[in-house]
Amino acid sequence: MDLSLIQKDILITLISLYHQHSQAIKGEEIAQVLRRNPGTVRNQMQALKALGLVDGIPGPKGGYHPTAQAYNELNLTISEHESVVPISRDGRPLKGVSVQEIDFTTLCHPDLCHAVIKLIGSVKSFEVGEMITVGPTPVNKLVIKGEIYGKDEVQQALLITISEMTSLPKKPIRDYMSTPLYTLSPDDAVADAIRLFSIHHIHGAPVVEDERLQGIITLSDVARALDKGLSTETHVVEVMTSDVVIAPAHIKLYEVISRFKEREIGRLVIIENGKPVGIITQSDIIRVFPSL
């Protein structure tokens, strides 16, 4: 059947939102993504419903969902087992749009690397000159950053000049953590912490008792304690930070990077079988990702 451009935009956006949220999508949500009048979207939805491309669900939690015929009409083969490949702008993931395919069009040029990013969703909210980030992809954990230099509204694709491309390591953080793990006990003195830091050239250490993590003490904690006039004989437990950010040893490295930014921390303690086994710092991550 012959769909108009706006009908294709609405249908693709509906499919994208439905694929992300697995629930009926309201016309207002589609209108917001497409920057269209909600009334226009509702009118077009009636036409798409008459064509058998969408089904309506009544009620407060109702909305629309695409039919199998809609996927066939747009030559899409999205299954419930497929992963969503995100696309973000200014570090914020965009709703109602995800990446279906990445085609590299220029790889051999010494100065340029171009790609076509085919979307599930509309390209209308994107502007030429904007910087976007695509990924990570589900298998190779590929992350691509680049500038949009063109749009194809028929194919729902973005043309970008790639400025950076990284394949995130898929190994668990146990392969990158610092070992052996140097620890302190709650009854150790601040002087013991200073000595440990100096000998091993480290800036922080977990506080452990009976193989259980109690807290962490860093150079910053020591500096604050001394600034308050506390003695170097003060017990570590009195100056340590109890709210420790931890991660299991089996988790992938790329999955914990965001925790450093969100929590504004310099190190993260690795736990295995309930016991601290290592530590990973911002320096460790920078060695893996020098561009960060």
Image (cartoon, grey):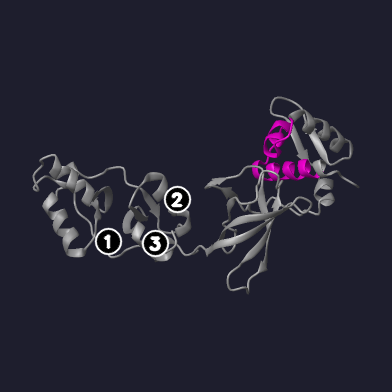
Disc 1 crowd rating (10 Å Cα; few below 14, some 14-19, many 20+) is some
Earlier in the chain: of badge 3 and badge 2, it is 2
Residue found at x 30% / y 65%: 179
Give the label, 1 or 2, closer to the camera. Answer: 2
Given residues 128 and 194, the one toward you in this image is 128
Report if residue 12 lies within the magenta region.
yes
| Residue 281 visible, this orientation | no
Q: Residue at x 58, y 70 (%)?
A: 111
Which amino acid type is marked by label 2? Ser
Circle 3 is placed at which residue position? 286
Mark 1: which amino acid?
Leu
Return the residue at label 1: 181
Q: Earlier in the sequence, mark 3 or mark 1?
A: 1
Circles 3 and 1, Cβ within 8 Å, touching? The answer is no
116 sits left or right of 139 in the view: right
Which residues make up the magenta segment? Answer: 8-37
- Give the secondary structure at mark 1: loop
- Residue occupying image coordinates x 8% and y 47%: 233
Pair 3/2: label in front: 3
Residue at 87% of width from left, 45% of height from top? 3
Q: Position of residue 257 (x, y in %)?
A: 43, 54
What residue is disc 2 on? Answer: 258
Q: In which quadrant is the C terminus drawn?
A: bottom left
